[in-house]
Image (tube, rainbow, N blue to C red):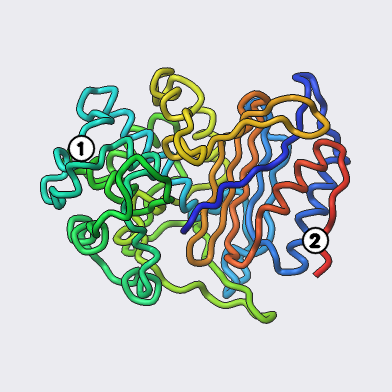
Amino acid sequence: MKKIIFLVFILVQSNNVVFSQTQNEMIDTLIQSYVNLNKFSGNVLVAKEDKIIFQKSYGFANREFDIPNNTNIKFRIVSFTKQFTAVLIMQLVESNRLNLNTPISQYLPYYRKDIGDSITIHHLLTHTGGLPEYTERDNFFSDISKRSYSHKEFIQKFCSDNLLYSPGTKYKYSNTGYYILGAIIEEITKNSYAEVLQKNILDVVGMKNTGVENSSTIVREIAKGYNFNSGIYSNADYIDLLSTIFSAGAIYSTTGDLLLWDKALYSDRILSKKSRELMFTPALENYGYGVGITKFVVPDLNKEMNFIFHQGAINGFRSIMTHIVNEDTLIIILCNNFDSDLNPINNAIFSILHNQSYTLPSE
């Protein structure tokens, strides 16, 4: 479930641009070419100023029963979850129930004090806490991820190793840190992460097709995850998301709900302007609070662009979500084929929208 920082080139358009059917057809042809080669299955949405300009589903949500993907299908959004966790943390900051610069040992009494005293909430949010990554354990995917744990038990067993470096000095992408943040949310609120998410974000934003995945709960219209190797599809390995991924990546959603989320995230509905500015301020390696952030001049446009983005990957699923702040453009790609590389699709969509050449996949 490691996030890869990436740079994408996105279309720059004036506010009165009209997106032609030809462009939509080209995007459709592009994605279908990946589908035909078994390199993509999922949903794609492109929006400009909150208006959907392209939305379509491809492949199958369930291959055993030949159930195709549609716009109502829910996908594991994986590391996009970190944006939600970061917002819940910032809401606690706004209500004066938490301080970004306070050691985590003050909020999590059962955490080992010798290292907890040196790691702050800010360190966890920015992946600079120095904690080892538990998903890199040799037996995580083969054993640990398939078992059920309480969050306290999991943290004590797998999120309490000795530090790799002094907190705040280096960046290392850390599901460990975001798992601990979820436990802190539960400790402070005395409610489950899912309950806090529902009350503070989902109900406020109107996200009716989003939630925290629980292996014991039936979720209607949710995609199954697959692998594609040597010309054959297979079911992705089981993983207990709530126990072992939790607030680092256990949320499911739809492209439509994520559009609502994106709109709310850049307004005052769930966070104040001050909190958003903190969240969107890059620390080490251009990572803010739950989001990657980068600014650069796009070739041929001679204009600096501001990208806020994230990727995700877990058993059977991949995802990309990119918001171009200064152009208010959003690209969401949710995929239930783990062996798909979504970056070429993302970049080719940019090329089509920007009237640039691009390459269709050949094999």
Label 2: state its secondary structure. Answer: helix
Residue at the image position 58 percent from the left and 72 percent from the top? 227
How far apart are labels 2 and 1 at the CA level? 50 Å
Label 1: state its secondary structure. Answer: loop
The quadrant the C terminus occupies is bottom right
Figure quadrant of residue 231: bottom right
* Three-letter amino acid code at the position of disc 2: Ser
Q: Is residue 302 left or right of residue 143?
A: right
Coordinates of residue 70 in the picture (x, y in percent): 62, 53
**Front residue of 347 and 112:** 112
Q: Is residue 63 left or right of residue 198?
A: right
**Front residue of 46 and 173:** 173
Q: Is residue 169 above or below residue 316?
A: above
Coordinates of residue 5 in the picture (x, y in percent): 56, 47
Give whichever of discs 2 and 1 has the lower sequence position.
2
Figure quadrant of residue 162: bottom left
Residue at the image position 53 percent from the left and 40 percent from the top? 258
Coordinates of residue 101 in the picture (x, y in percent): 26, 30
* Three-letter amino acid code at the position of disc 1: Pro
Coordinates of residue 34 in the picture (x, y in percent): 75, 61
Figure quadrant of residue 274: top left
Where does label 2 land, which residue? 33
Where does label 1 land, which residue? 103
